[in-house]
Every structure is written in structure tokens, then in C-alpha cells.
Image (cartoon, rainbow, N blue to C red):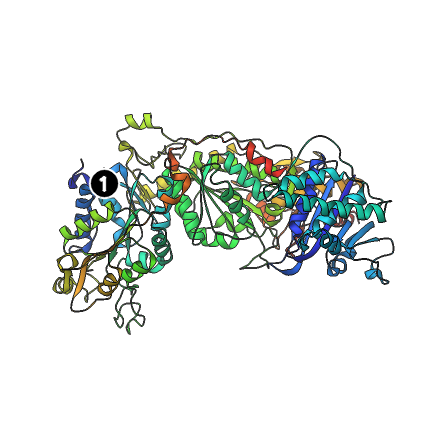
Amino acid sequence: MAESKDFRTDKKPVWCPGCGNFGILTALRGALADSGYEPHQLMIVSGIGCHGAVIQYVNANGFHSIHGRTLPVATGIHLANHELCILTMVGDGDGYGIGMGHFIHAMRRNLDMTQIVHNNKLYSLTTGQTSPTTDKGRPTKSTPFGVIEIPVNPLTLALSSGATYISRGFAGDPPHLRKLIADAMAHKGFALVDVLQPCITFNHANTNAFYKERVYKLEDETGYDPGDRQAAYERALEWGERIPIGLFYRESRPTYEDEVVTLKDMPLVKRPIKGVDITKTLEQFL
Amino acid sequence: MEFSWMVGGEAGFGIMASGLTLSKTFARGGLHVFDTIEYPSLIRGGHNTCMVRTANREVHSHTGYIDMLVALNEETIHLHKDEMAQTGCILFDGMHEPEDRFGVHADISLFPIPLGDIVKDIGGRPIMRNTAAIGATIALIGYDLSILEDLLADMFKRKSEDVVRDNIHVARAGYDFMMDNHPGGSGIIVKPQDNYRRMVVTGNEAVGLGALSAGCTFYSAYPMTPASGILHFLAAEERNYNLVVKHTEDELAAILMAIGASHAGVRAMTASSGGGFSLMVEALGLAAMTETPLVIMEGQRPGPSTGLATRTEQGDLRFVLHASQGDFPRVVIAPGDVEECFQAAGHAFNLAEKYQVPVIILTDKFLTESHKTVLAFEPVPVDRGMLLDEAHLDRITDYKRYEITDSGISPRIIPGHRNGVFRANSNEHDEYGFDLEDPLNRTAMMDKRMRKLEQIASELPEPHLYGPQKADVTLLSWGSTKGPILEAMLLLKNNNITVNFLQIMNLHPFPLEKVTRIMKRATLTIDVENNKTAQLAGLIREHTGLKVDEKILKYSGRPFTPEEIANSVAEVVEHGRK
């Protein structure tokens, strides 16, 4: 069985020292080891942004796609070979901005994959412009007089779009995040792990200290039931003095591929590709 | 024998279905058929037509004249009376010929038939007026009614015996009415000829069949005229061939899912029109950079923007040649008829996999939605190129997905093998797929990818020259204009003008040698295109340095008729002789 170190590559991360991505990478490698999968059984699809380089640093099959388009690439891979374990790694710009449409449809479909969002509430690789999760009023390079829109709430969005595993982690707590990712991977269906990720270079509001003071774990709350959608909505709306992390909601629903009749026997890729006899189909044209 | 029939009426009258019924009735009688539809972008109302042309020789296109017009409303007569052949006739829904004869020329016969009443008497639905009209048509041309009856039985047997019976009753009632009231017929005779049973197939269906035959198992698309026909066809076949057919949230997802599926190891395809392809452009570059095999059909319609959503044009040649940022190898194939659509699909999958490049099949509304008779389709043997198998992978220790080779082709694998862990990367990358911005690596990788084009160019068949080697006029064209051009050549033959025609099917890589040879030895070259700016002529100039002498262009959103091309060629020749 693969261990955490087996998921390393010889590439040195190019992220800023102290970047939240390091905590996510540590948690990810640990979760991959916990999952029981080996590198060749995994497929990690990343987008564009600081997070995108993650496939360089994880020893597993990877597909570094284009901005906002991880989910349709991952969906194609998944529908062709649902035996691969698929993770999509995206940023808040990728997942909640330019790729928002795909995100909602992937959740509706309940595709069996895990989406990890490196949510630093800013566009950082492009040097600090507003993102869909930047707080209202925050001045950024592209909004010097403050953001006018209210931020996207990924968790309530996921709750109303049909995701079946909805969680939030914190890059500053890798052991906790590791467990969330491992559980998300074990979950059959679309799993969201939104990760609060400090950007030490550009985001001076949502810092490591900011989150450390505020986060609390849902699993420590007595009586919190991740099967209760109403309760999940209430916690998902909580953002202020206290910020919940952990598993918000989980349900069991057939996955997309469960309901595709032609995938019942075997993955598409297992069927040999050869010339196909179409004689029977030609009759309809007579 | 040649016979051109048109049915016209409002959308919702079943115009397209009745055209196909008559086409199949002729095809089952061993005749050749071409049919084409014209319709506005709406579901009810408007003016729809279907022209069915049949002959006892191969029919390549519709014509500009009508031998028999079936008018399901009066508007149809007014809109098309000027297109009637001199000895043509009009069959219309009514009891009597009106005094003004709709202003139709005296030589044109009018055949009133109470289609609505015939259907009502039998208890049929109003849409069955078509069937009665086809029965009446058969009576007027002396064709064999039993062929239609057998066809209706086959068409409706899945619905119920009652539906079969009602349709046959209605067809027979239409037939009997004409036999009783006009026993002399229309003067036009169409007879069944041989025992060949030809298929009646659209370009869309042929591309879909070609994809099925080539082992394509994944198709993702978003509906858009005129490419939706492939989606409908393959979706219906999903369970017969163990496919996954996905109607996606948009065209971005359509192409990206196909890229993902292809990356995972299956043969995958998407299709759209120019508008949808516009949305796919960024991902086209992703396929190129990750060297993922991909087949895309682009069915052109008049742009820019929504343009004429249900009409035809060839305005996207330059667009597909240059779409997406950066230089990368791609293949563009423009089939000219239904058989070539089938073949293009088979070749496209082979080229995509052998060279790990995107392959674009460029069609248009006129090709994808018109029917043509085909006796048989010749399958293209599957060639997956350098795809390493399980046994090979068992022995490999240092797999380089983007290995720099002399051919530029790097051995591909199906992800999932222990020895084949790798990264596909939209960033410039090293041989393993890791990011690398090094200038030497960048140059080597660009050279590696682009080297593939030379091999592709040497593999692609040369353009075909129709007609005599030496001719007064050499026509150059691509795509669906092939049909009207071949028909125009027949007309020009009678006109004492010898014409040959170079059909440039493989547009990229460009067939430099043959085009140069033909251009140089031609007496008078004429470029024929369904667009405003003569995009092929520009391409020929760009590659060969040679200028096409004259251009015949049409960009009204409608396909050329053979007569338009023949007349324009004759004018050019006449002008030249002065």
C-alpha cells in the first residue's frame, strides 16, 4: 500500500514561502495514502491559478487543464473510465468564477469525484484581483474602491445544486483537512472540499491568524447531524466571529454513471476499439 | 429520366417527413435521389419546402426548377410559380381550379385535390395530407403505389397496426382520386428501374454512421443546427452500440468532455456549428497542447453571430484553419457528399489517433441535412497509431508521454497502468509532461509537434480532378458545392464547354503539389464557393502564389443550384471569348 511519501515527486513547489497551498499539498498526499489508491489508479485534474501546479508535486496521473474547465475534462475521463479515482483541484476563480456553470452541472449529476477548491478569496497568480469569494467592500487591484458584489457562498450553492458530500477545510490544519479529503474520496458521489487558504502575498485580510481565531469544527458540536440539510444551510451561512469547518452535509444518491445503462458492465475504455459492424443500423435508411 | 418534386407549406405540416417518404419510395424502386430542405428557424408557421429530385443515374444535388409542386397552402404556389419547369404541374389542396389560376403560366397544369377532405373521410389526422399528396403524386407520374404502401407499413409498424392501416388508406385515397379524375396523369413518367435498394442518408447521419463504424464510443455535444442530427442519431443508438452520448451544459463542456474521454483512451467526438465551435476554440488548443486525439465536426451556417440559423454557407474555412492561439498541427477535411462524410469520419479518427491531433470535419447545412441515396458504405479500417498495449507497458521503466521523436509522434498509453503514470499539461512541458519554460525545450517541443504535419501531408490523398484532364474551364471548390458543380458540368457539356473540377477535400495540411500542378496547366480557373470572400481562392494564393482567374460566389444563405453555376461559368467563358 502506498504511503504519503510515495505521492511525492522530485519537483520543488514554486509557491510563496508560507502559502496555504503547502498545507493543502501535505493534507492531500496524506489523504491519497489513506485512500488506499496507488498513483496509477488516480487522476488529478487541475485548473489554472497558483493551485494548478499541484499536479507537478503529486505522484499520480495528472491533467493540467485550462482555466475553469477542470470539471468537464474530469467528467469525460470519468465517463470513459469510471475505475480511475478522480480528483479535481481548482481555485476559487476556476471553480466559482469562470467555471461556475460546470460546477453546478457536475453537482446535479452527482458524478463520483472529489473537488478540492483552493479558496484564497483572491486571484493571486494574476497578482491580486477580486475573486467571486472576495468579501464585499474589499479593495483589490481590480476593485480599488471596494468590491460591489456580495461573495458566492460555495456551500449553500452546493447544498442547492445536488452535491452529496459538502465540506470545508482549512489549509492551516492539514491533519483535519487530510481526513476531510480522504472521506470525500471514499464518498460515492460528488464531494466538495472547499479549503480556506490564506494567500500570504496578496490577501492581508483573510490571513492564517484571521482563520485560526475563528474556525471551529462541526464534528465537535454536540448534536450536529450532517444528514440534516436545514442545519447544514444554517451553518453554511455562518461567517463572522465563528467560521465552521468540517463536514456540513452528506447524503446517498445514485451517481451519474450508476444510471448510464451502457456503463453497467464495464468502463467504456475496457471495450476493445475495432471496426464495428453497422449493418443492422443501416436498415432504417431503406 | 429526371424528376424534380417540391412540397411546400407551413412548419408543422410535416414537410420534411413527406419529402423523406417520397425519397425512400423512389430509392426502393432502384432510383437515385437527392433531397434538400429549406426552413426558417421556427417550429410553427413560416414557409418550409422539401425538394426531392430523382433520376435513373446518380443525382448530386437539387435543381433550380420544379417539375411537380405540391402546395399544401396557397402561399407555396405564389412563392414558387416562377421556378416551375415549362411542362411542370402543381398539385394543390382544393376542389377546383380558381379562375385566375393563381397567376400561374398557362403551360403549367393545375391538379386540385381535396387533401383535407380525403384525410377527414378516413378519420386521419390533418398532418396526413402529405401522405395523400404522395399517393396522388405517384398516380400522376405512373409510379408503383405498392412501393409506397410497403414503405408506410415499415415506417409505422412500430407505432401500431391502426397507424399503418390509416396511412395506407390515405395514400391509396390520394392515388385513387388522381386516377379517377386525371387518368391521363401529368405527362411525366417515373418508373422503378432496378432491384438495388439504396439507402437515403443525410450528411449528419453519414458522419454518425462513420463514427460508429470507426469504434467511436463517446459523443458529447450541445444542440445547434445543423449539427444536432448527429446528436439525435447517436443518442438513439447509445444502447445498441454501448456508447456514452452526453448532451452537455454548453459547447465548452462538449469539447472538453470529448478531450477527457479521449485522454482516458476511447474514441471521442463532438460537433457543432460555427457558433458552438467559437465556444470550443480555447479547448481546441488544449487538445493540441496535450496531444489528445480529437474529432470535431463543424457544420457551417451563415454567420456572423446567429446569422441565418437554418440556412447554409461556407464561411468558416478560415476560422477553422486558424482557430485558437498559437501554432499547432491540425487536420481539416471537408467532405463533399454523403459517402465522403462517412469516409471522413473514419479517416478523422485514424488521423486523430495516429498523429494525436485535433481533426476537424468541415461540413455545412446543405450537406448535413440533405439526403442522398447510397448503395453501401465502405468502412475505414481502424488504426489507433502508436498506442502502447498492456504487455509493452509491463516492460517499460521510464515512460515519456511527450518523448521527442523523429516523426514528432510520441507513444501514447491508456492511463491506469502502474508504469505509465504521467501528466498531460496545457503548459509547455518536458518529455514527461512536467512544466518547463526553458527556451531550448520550448523550441524542441514546438518542432516536435509541428513535424507531424509533414507526415500527415504525405499520407492524405491528393485532391480529385473530375472531368477531362484538359478543359476550357477548371473549377476549384471544396465541401458541399461538389454536388451542384457535378450537375453543372453535365449541363455545360450540352453547352459545348468542357469543364473539369478540382475538389479540394483535405484543406489542411494543404495539398500544395496537386493544386499547383492543376492551376499551372489550367486554361481558365474559376473558384466556386458558398461565401462572400472566396476563402479557398485566398488559401490557394497563399500556398501556391497563384491567382484563380475568376470567382463564382453565393452568400444568400442558400446553396448553389446547378443552373446558377452553369450559367455563371457560361457567362465567364462568353466574356472571355469577347
- Subunit that carries the residue with mark 1: A
Q: Nearer the viewer, residue A33 or B561?
A: A33
Is residue B108 at least partly visible in the picture?
Answer: yes
Is residue B61 at least partly visible in the picture?
Answer: no
Q: Nearer the viewer, residue B352 or B427?
A: B352
Residue B429: % across, % down: 31, 43
Q: Residue at x 59, y 33 (%)?
A: B377
Residue A10: % across, % down: 19, 40
User: Looking at the image, which residue sits at the far bottom?
Assistant: A145
Around disc 1, counting alpha carbons within 10 Å, would you say few (fewer than 14), some (14 to 19), or many (20 or more)?
Answer: many
Residue A61: % across, % down: 28, 40
Q: Residue at x 66, y 35 (%)?
A: B198
**Number of numbered discs:** 1
The residue carrying mark 1 is A59
Q: Secondary structure at mark 1?
A: loop
Q: Residue at x 49, y 34 (%)?
A: B214
Residue A1 picture quarter:
top left
Q: Is residue A92 above or below residue B522?
A: below
